Amino acid sequence: MIWLTWRQFRVQFLVVATVVAAAIVVLAVTGPGLADDYRRLTTGFIRSLAFERLNPNLYYIGQALLYAVPPVIGAFWGAPLIARELETGTHRLVWSQSIGRRRWLATKVGVAGLGTIVVTGLLSLAVTWWSSPIDDAINAGQSSNTYLPRMFPPVFAARGLVPIGYAAFAFALGVAVGLVVRRTLVALAVTLAVVILVQILTPTLVRPHLLEPTDRNIVASAENIRGFLLDGSGPDPQVKQIEVATGAVGAWKLSDETVDKSGNALSVLPAWMIDCEPGPPPGTARETTPNPKRDVCFQRLADEGYRQHVRYFTADTFWSLQWREFGVFMLLALGLTGFSFWRIRRDLS
Amino acid sequence: MTAVLQAQGLGKRYGRRWALTDCELEVPAGRVVGLVGPNGAGKSTLLNLAVGMITPTTGTVEVLGTPAGAQQAKVGYVAQDTPTYSRLSVADHLKLGARLNPAWDDSVARQRIENLGFDPRQRAGRLSGGQRAQLALTLGLAKRPEVLLLDEPVAALDPLARREFLQDLMEAVAEHELSVVLSSHLVSDVERACDYLIVLVDSRVQVNGEIDTLLATHFRLTGPRKDAKDLPRDQHVVTESHTDRQSTFLIRTDRPILDPAWTVSQLTLEDLVLAYMGRTAPAQPERPLLEVRR
């Protein structure tokens, strides 16, 4: 049965595996150089990357591949696995051999599922290892407009264990959908759409609930203010929102809201806060030009007890968050596979 | 001797539609059974139940004395439209059979493929319908089952390929001494290949038995107009038709027909099957028994 599974699966497998293997080779070749640069340049490492072309591109290619692999595996490995058999009727040929349909399903899911985990695992390992100098430098406080801390949603799901969880989930989803709709193309499209949707929605809907975030109240000041949202143009702009830096390097901020001295969140900020506006241009000019009006505003803000209530995941929660998200998607994958084993026992003529 | 196929109160419902109802069957071993009925009569349902592909809604079905699906290695099945893996070669199919069946007979498989003149490297998707059916049959035979079930194996074939396939099947049956159940909606297929008949109409078994016996016990009676209830009790009316002065009955009886008023004629298998297929619900009121007094 393993032979038959491989015989049917090898084309899809080799297409994906070849792309992944090529990527791994390129990363393996260029990785030591990048790590060496970091050791050599230390604090100037990120700045030096701006003058390179290959490594920044590889950084994005690795990230993009890890986002692409789960939907591709779900749609092209998972969905056709059973759906194509049911669609062409070949399940009736193979089930009339001396093999039970559950063993048949177990072998197919086992072989292709193992392939899913191995291929995604190796790619994720390569990308995580290759990117570690950049991730370390960012987490060590080197500033960059190009590279985000690995806690941030675009990077988080392209490192460590999470891609494996997504891929396993996508594969199991493809199998289950294929078993239910019994049409390869429909199963493929549904799987592709659902997996991409899950990838988009997980950072906002799932990830914040996996761990208890750090919860702090911070007094906004001229030094830590990072965002100032104004509404309405003309003479009377309204302050909608203030954002501050958490002070934790590499942390991923979930929420940032202004509360008054009794701790209630404000939907409308007092009009006088307009004076706290950092003013254009941001950056160095702000610190050098004294602005007494702004200082008064921040003083009043502190005196009247206004605080910024921030919730964030610190950089050192990276692996526990990774394990939890991985666990959630592995459980989903197991659940879907269990469903497939239950469904295969029902009438399928 | 255990029955090859035994059904008791067997029924299968899909949603609100019954595909098979109240099926009582006992098919003896060593026969080539023709399962005949119009399209949608429940032939595929019966065979799918027998191989355990689907589970019954009511009743039980046993194959070789055990519940359907329990002895996969002993039951060969060639499904409707004879599915094959279009991207796998003929040789791959044989390898598949060899790997998935403990009793696989590779020499039978190779011999058959050679006799059929197939190129083992040919992909199954490029075979003709008849060739695909032959390939599926090869898999079914080389598995060395005790009973082989074939669901309309020749439905998609042209008359010539049909004849070849059935001839081939008969040779294999003679060689391997297996029991066969073959479904078809054409009587001619059954006439050519089978010695036992099951007629399935409207999801019910109308008649079943050895073809020779069936032909020897069914007669057409033509004579002056008479009511069905006036016939002797041992003569079961299958169909009747009347004109103003004449009546024609198709009856089943184990006894000789004594009434001299009738012109008695033999039936062909096709007449017999068509009579059962075209029959409406039978009404069997109490009727007198006509006996010979000596």
Image (cartoon, grey):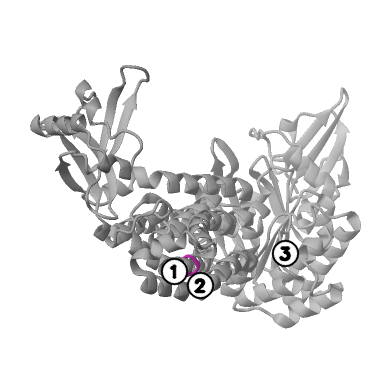
Q: Are marks 2 and 3 on the same chain?
A: no
Q: CA distance from mark 1 to mark 3?
A: 40 Å
Question: What chain letter is assigned to the residue under label 2?
Answer: A
User: In the image, residue B271 lies at what x, y percent?
Assistant: 84, 45
Q: Residue at x 59, y 64 (%)?
A: A16
Q: Residue at x 23, y 35 (%)?
A: A257
Q: Which mark is residue A130?
A: 1
Element assignment for label 2? helix
Position of residue B117 in the picture relative to residue B89 (left or right): right
User: In the image, residue A347 lies at what x, y percent?
Assistant: 54, 51
Question: What chain letter is assigned to the residue under label 1?
Answer: A
Query: Which amino acid lies under the numbered mark 2 shown in the image of this protein?
Result: Thr
Q: CA distance from mark 2 to mark 3?
A: 40 Å
Q: In front here: A128 or A95?
A: A128
Please identify the residue farthest to the bottom as the structure is shown: B107
Which range is magenta? A118-122
Question: What chain letter is assigned to the residue under label 3?
Answer: B
Total label count? 3
Q: Decide: marks 1, 2 in contact (CB < 8 A)?
A: yes
Q: Residue at x 40, y 43 (%)?
A: A201
In the displayed structure, B1 sits above or below A235; it is below
Q: Residue at x 67, y 34 (%)?
A: B281
Residue B286: quarter of image: top right
Answer few, some or many: residues within 10 Å of disc 3's Cα (few below 14, many 20 plus, some between 14 and 19). Answer: some
Q: Which mark is residue A30?
A: 2
